[in-house]
Image (cartoon, rainbow, N blue to C red):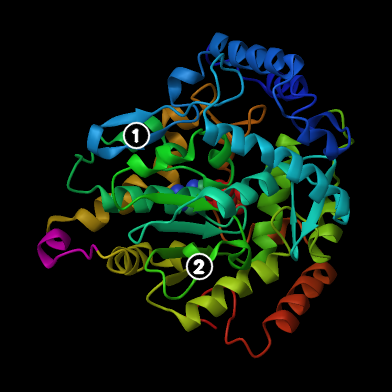
C-alpha cells in the first residue's frame, strides 16, 4: 500500500486542508485562518493519519538530515499537537493576525497552484510563504557560518541540495552507503520558507551543526539584512536557469500540485502569466537580477551559478562550489576520484532512479496540508526542453523580455562560455 500514492490521493489530501490552504480553490484569504480551530486540528490529524496509513512518514517525510548525529531530524508542528504552546509559539501564532491584515492590503492575481497569489514588496507570493517571510524577518537569526541555497522555482534546487550536502559531508559517509541514497536530496537540509512555520520553535534550527544550510526561493530584497547585508558573513549559492526551461518545468510541477477544485492552468495561460511576472516568487527576471547584482557587489558572499553550465561541466562547477563554501577539494581528493563520485551520486540519472524518488518512495511536507512526492522533483533534467513547447513567437517574446530586463547588467542566461 505504501507505493500507492496516486495523484488522486494527493489531491484528496490537499482538499482536506480546506481552511489551511488554497488548494480548495477558495479564496486564499481563508488560508490565514490557520489558528488552532478544532476543525483545523481535525483536518490536520486526518491528514497526518492519512499519510501514516500510506507509510510516507517513515520514508523521510518532512525531515532533514542531521549529519553529526547521523539521524534525521523530525520537525514538530504546533498545529496538530496537544501541547501548551510556549511563549515563542504564541508569538508565531500572532503572525496569523498580521498576515490577515497584510493580505487585505495587497494586490492579488491568479496563482499557479492555488487560487491566488499576492504582490508583496515587488514579488508574487502565496499567503503561506508570506507568513514564512514574516517569521524569517521576525525570528530567524542567521549565523555567520550559514549557507543559503537560493533559486527561483525549478532552476536546480534539488540538484544543488544534493551537491552541497554531499560536498560538505564528504568525510562522513561512504559513497556506496550514502544517506542521500536512502533519504533523497529533499531531506538534505530545511526549506526555510515553509519549515520556518512547520518546525516550531525556530530555535530548533540553532542546534543544527555548522555550517547550517537552508534552501529558499525568496528574492534577495525580501530577506532580512542579517542574511543579505554584505557585512554579514553568511553565504548564498544562487542557481539560475534559462527562463524558458524554468517556465516549462514550473508549469508541469504546478499542474501536478494544482487543486482539482480549480480549473487546470493551461500552458498558454501559464505562459502569459509568466511573461507578465505573475508566478509564485516571480517576476523571474527581478529574482535573478537581484541575486546577480548582489553577487557582483559581494562575490565572496554570493556564488552565482547557471544550470546550463552545471550540466555541461558539472565537475568544474562543483569545484567552484566547494571552494566557495570554504571546503575546496585537495589534489589528493581529486586523484582519489572524490569529485567524480559526488557528481555521479548527485546526477539526475542516479537520483531519479533511487527508490526514495520513485512512486511511493516518500513525500515532502511543505505546509500542514501540502505534501509533494519526491518523484515530482525529477522530470527530464535537460537543457532546452522549451523547444518542445514554445512557438517561435513565444520564444522571441521571452528572449526579448530577458534582453530588456538584463540590459547593462552584464548578465546573460544560458551557457556562460557561449555568451
Ligand atoms: P525539468 O522539469 O526541466 O526536468 P528544482 O529542484 O529547483 O525544483 O528544479 C527541478 C528541475 O531540476 C527539474 O527540471 C528536474 O528534472 C531538474 N533536476 C532535478 N534533479 C536534477 C539533477 N540531479 N540534475 C539535473 N537536473 C535535475
Residue at 73%, 29% (x, y): give it. Answer: 34
Dividing the picture into quadrants, the one containing residue 105 is: bottom right
Residue at 66%, 51% (x, y): give it. Answer: 249
The circle drawn on residue 232 is: none
Residue at 72%, 80% (x, y): give it. Answer: 405
Q: Is the C terminus in the top left, top right, bottom left or bottom right quadrant?
A: bottom right
Residue 135 part of the magenta-drawn span: no
* 391 shown above or below 192: below
Which range of residues does the magenta coloring cover? 327-335
Question: How dense is the environment of label 1, judged by Cα within 10 Å: few (below 14), some, or many (20 and up)?
Answer: some
Whether residue 373 appears in this view of the structure is: no
Residue at disc 1, secondary structure? helix
- Left or right of 276 on screen, residue 348: left
Give the alpha-carbon distance from disc 2 to disc 1, as whole Å: 33 Å
- Left or right of 176 on screen, residue 204: right
* 166 shown above or below 305: above
Q: Name the residue under label 1.
A: 181
Residue 308: where, in percent of width, then height?
Answer: 51, 66
Closer-to-camera residue (230/141) = 141
Q: Mark 2 points at which residue?
A: 228
Question: How dense is the environment of label 2, judged by Cα within 10 Å: few (below 14), some, or many (20 and up)?
Answer: many
Residue 10: where, in percent of width, then height?
Answer: 68, 23
Residue at disc 2, secondary structure? helix
Whether residue 249 appears in this view of the structure is: yes
- Left or right of 145 on screen, residue 50: right
Residue at 62%, 45% (x, y): give it. Answer: 132
Q: Is the N terminus in the top left, top right, bottom left or bottom right quadrant?
A: top right
Residue 324: where, in percent of width, then height?
Answer: 32, 68
Residue 228: where, in percent of width, then height?
Answer: 50, 67
Amino acid at each position: 500500500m505504501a507505493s500507492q500514492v496516486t495523484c488522486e490521493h494527493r489531491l484528496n489530501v490537499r482538499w482536506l486542508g480546506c481552511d489551511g490552504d488554497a488548494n480548495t480553490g477558495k479564496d486564499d484569504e481563508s488560508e490565514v485562518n490557520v489558528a488552532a480551530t478544532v476543525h483545523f486540528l481535525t483536518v490536520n490529524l486526518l491528514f497526518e493519519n492519512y499519510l501514516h496509513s500510506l507509510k510516507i512518514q517513515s520514508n523521510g517525510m518532512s525531515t532533514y538530515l542531521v549529519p553529526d548525529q547521523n539521524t534525521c531530524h523530525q520537525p514538530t508542528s504546533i498545529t496538530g499537537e496537544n501541547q501548551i504552546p510556549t511563549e515563542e509559539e504564541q508569538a508565531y501564532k500572532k503572525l496569523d493576525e498580521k498576515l490577515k491584515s497584510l493580505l487585505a492590503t495587497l494586490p492579488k492575481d491568479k496563482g499557479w497552484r492555488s487560487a491566488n497569489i499576492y504582490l508583496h514588496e515587488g514579488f508574487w507570493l502565496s499567503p503561506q510563504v508570506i507568513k514564512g517571510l514574516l517569521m524569517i524577518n521576525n525570528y530567524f537569526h542567521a549565523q555567520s557560518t550559514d549557507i543559503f541555497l537560493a533559486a527561483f522555482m525549478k532552476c536546480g534546487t534539488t540538484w544543488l541540495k544534493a551537491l552541497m550536502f554531499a560536498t560538505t559531508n564528504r568525510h562522513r559517509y561512504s559513497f556506496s552507503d550514502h544517506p542521500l541514497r536512502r533519504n533523497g536530496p529533499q531531506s538534505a537540509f530545511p526549506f526555510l520558507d515553509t519549515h520556518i512555520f512547520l518546525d516550531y520553535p525556530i530555535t530548533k534550527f540553532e542546534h543544527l551543526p555548522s555550517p547550517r544550510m537552508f534552501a529558499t526561493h525568496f528574492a534577495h530584497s525580501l530577506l532580512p539584512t542579517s542574511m543579505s547585508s554584505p557585512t554579514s558573513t553568511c553565504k548564498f549559492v544562487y542557481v539560475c536557469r534559462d527562463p524558458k526551461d524554468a517556465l516549462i518545468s514550473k508549469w508541469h510541477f504546478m499542474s501536478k500540485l494544482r487543486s482539482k477544485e480549480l480549473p487546470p492552468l493551461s500552458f498558454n495561460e501559464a505562459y502569459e502569466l509568466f511573461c507578465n511576472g505573475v508566478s509564485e516568487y516571480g517576476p523571474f527576471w527581478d529574482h535573478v537580477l537581484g541575486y546577480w547584482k548582489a553577487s557582483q557587489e559581494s562575490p565572496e558572499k554570493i556564488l552565482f551559478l547557471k544550470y546550463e553550465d552545471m550540466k555541461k561541466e558539472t565537475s568544474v562547477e562543483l569545484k567552484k562550489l566547494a571552494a566557495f563554501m570554504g571546503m575546496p577539494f585537495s589534489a589528493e581528493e581529486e586523484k582519489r576520484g572524490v569529485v567524480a563520485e559526488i557528481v555521479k551520486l548527485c546526477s539526475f540519472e542516479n537520483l531519479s532512479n533511487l527508490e526514495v524518488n520513485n512512486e511511493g518512495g516518500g513525500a515532502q511536507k511543505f505546509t500542514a496540508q501540502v505534501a509533494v512526492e519526491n518523484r515530482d522533483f525529477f522530470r527530464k533534467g535537460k537543457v532546452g526542453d522549451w523547444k518542445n513547447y514554445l512557438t517561435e513567437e513565444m520564444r522571441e517574446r521571452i528572449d526579448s523580455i530577458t534582453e530588456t530586463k538584463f540590459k547593462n547588467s552584464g548578465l546573460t542566461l544560458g551557457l556562460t562560455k557561449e555568451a
